Amino acid sequence: MSRKYTRPGLTLLFASLAFIAGCAGGPSSDEDVQRALSMNTSTSVDRYVLGATDVVQVSVWRNEDLSVSVPVRPDGKISVPLVGDVQASGRTPTDLANDIEEQLARYIREPNVSVVVTSMGSHEYNDRVRVTGAVEQPMSVPHRAGMTVLDVVLGAGGATPFASLNNAMLYRKIDGDVVAIPIRLEDILNDGDVRTNYAIRPGDILSVPERSF
């Protein structure tokens, strides 16, 4: 069966392969592994940072004519009535709201601005989970709360007959580094030993190597 990839899909595939290649060299230290496993797995960020393709609702209290719903443009900016272009990408909604308030203060008295993200397009790919290597269907899927290693392996159609199951590795970014977490897939799939059936975090990459013959 042929596989078709979109340009963003190919970019992410190559990025994932480079990401894994840069982490080659075996599992991380026990300390780093435990630190990575202690991270929140329901979300990839402690606070949301805006990016291109996000859509925000800018509301100005008692000034409906100044309230707009706008996308963050590829240049990272949004357009707001009276204010004009405002840098949004790389900022939190609260920071953006404060900036708009400061600029609107030149035109109206004591503006009260709120910014709500109504579409999180910029995190569509950043928060995906990827499975590569000796699985029937390597894939990239949206993260779901409660997702585990077993869920993503089964979603990829299971491992191939050539998989080195107990040498699988889960790669997770933490504080700018990448931690390699050993996964014993054979124990999970064949023995019911789920000690390494860890919860998956957005952005994780599970790599299943082939056996050496």
Image: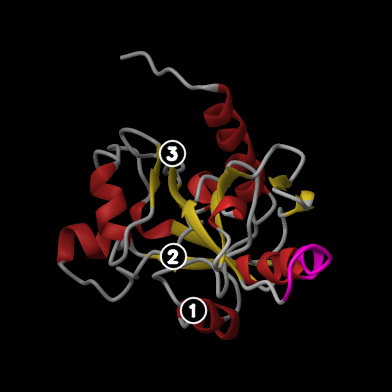
Of marks 1 and 2, which one's residue comes earlier in the chain? 1
Disc 2 marks a residue whose amino acid type is Arg
Of marks 1 and 3, which one's residue comes earlier in the chain? 1
Majority SS type along the magenta span = loop
Query: Residue 114, image x and y in percent?
Result: 57, 68
Q: Quadrant of the N terminus?
A: top left
Q: Disc 2 designates what residue?
A: 201
Disc 1 marks a residue whose amino acid type is Met
SS at badge 1:
loop
Residue 49 on the magenta span: no
In this orientation, which residue lies closer to the viewer: 23 or 203?
Answer: 203
Are circles 1 and 2 on residues that touch, CB within 8 Å? yes
Query: Residue 116, image x and y in percent?
Result: 51, 62
Of marks 3 and 2, which one's residue comes earlier in the chain? 2
Residue at 71% of width from left, 63% of height from top?
A: 91
User: Distance of mark 1 from mark 3, alpha carbons?
Assistant: 37 Å
- Numbered tag placed on residue 213 in the rendering: 3
Q: Counting other residues with Cα less than 10 Å from the Cα at mark 2, is it few (<14), some (14-19), or many (20 or more)?
A: many
Q: Compared to 182, does 74 lie above or below?
A: above
Q: Disc 1 designates what residue?
A: 39
Residue 106 on the magenta span: yes
Query: Which of the two marks, 1 or 3, is nearer to us in this view?
Result: 1
